[in-house]
Every structure is written in C-alpha cells, then in structure tokens.
Image (cartoon, grey):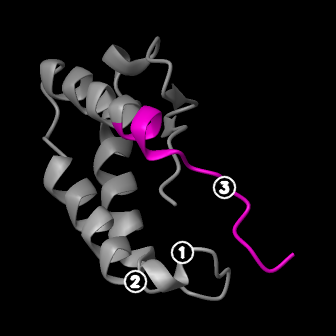
C-alpha cells in the first residue's frame, strides 16, 4: 500500500481536536493550539505529499503537538476524556 493508512475528514476531526484542546486548557494544561496550527500549516504547504507514506516532512510538527496534548492525557483530569487512553492521546495527526 503506497498511501497513508489514516483517512482524515477535517471537519469532524478538527472539531474534535478543538474540543479536546479546550477540555485540556479548562483542566489547567498548556494550550497546544499553536502547535496544531503549525502541523496544519505544514500540510497546507505540502498537500502534494499528503498521500505519500514516504513523506515525513510534517513528522516534527505532529510530534510536537502530540507531546503537548499528551501531557494532559497523563493527568487525573483526563482519565475519562474520550480522546485519551492509557496516558496517551487517541487523536493521531495525519
């Protein structure tokens, strides 16, 4: 298979990310929105590569965002958050 495994429809995905980040901030965690926007900006600049499994140019931006929201997922406040599981975020950047 030469394409990415994730099929991301931005409208529900981005709304889910926004709600998730709002819950994290309400629980006293850092706001990770700027990192998510940087991830989106990276893909907007590399749209021709979005289906390529070999393209890793946006991996750093994805990791930075996941690391940021991952802090929230490790808190007691996130134990019942539907986007956290076992101390990690279920939301995978594309």
Q: Which residue is mark 2?
A: 46
User: Is 61 drawn above or below residue 94 in the view shown?
Assistant: below
Mark 3, secondary structure of its residue: loop
Give residue 70's quadrant in the image: top left
Foreground residue, 69 or 6?
6
Q: Which mark is residue 83?
A: none
Foreground residue, 82 or 2?
2
Asked whether the residues under the numbered discs 1 and 2 touch, taking CB atoms below 8 Å apart as contact, a structural biologist would say yes
Q: What residue is drawn where x is 39% and y is 53%? A: 66
Q: Is residue 62 visible?
A: yes
Q: Which residue is mark 1?
A: 50
Indicate whether residue 2 is drawn in magenta. yes
Mark 2, secondary structure of its residue: loop
The label nearer to you, 1 versus 3, is 1
x then y, percent, for residue 84: 49, 29
Q: Residues within 10 Å of mark 1 (few under 14, many from 20)?
A: some
Q: Main secondary structure of the magenta part?
A: loop
Foreground residue, 70 or 38?
38
Q: Residues within 10 Å of mark 2 (few under 14, many from 20)?
A: few
**Mark 3 / mark 2, whichever is N-terminal:** 3
x then y, percent, for residue 9: 52, 45
Indicate whether residue 52 is drawn in magenta. no
Q: Residues within 10 Å of mark 3 (few under 14, many from 20)?
A: few
**Distance of mark 3 from mark 2, alpha carbons?**
17 Å
**Distance of mark 1 from mark 3, alpha carbons?**
11 Å
């Amino acid at each position: 298979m030469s394409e990415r495994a994730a099929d991301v429809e931005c409208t529900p995905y981005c709304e889910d990310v926004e709600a998730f980040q709002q819950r994290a901030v309400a629980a006293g965690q850092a706001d990770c929105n700027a990192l998510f926007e940087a991830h989106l900006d990276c893909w907007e600049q590399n749209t021709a590569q979005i289906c390529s499994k070999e393209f890793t140019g946006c991996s750093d931006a994805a990791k930075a965002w996941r690391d940021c929201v991952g802090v929230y997922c490790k808190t007691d406040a996130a134990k019942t958050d539907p986007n956290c599981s076992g101390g990690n975020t279920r939301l995978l950047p594309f």
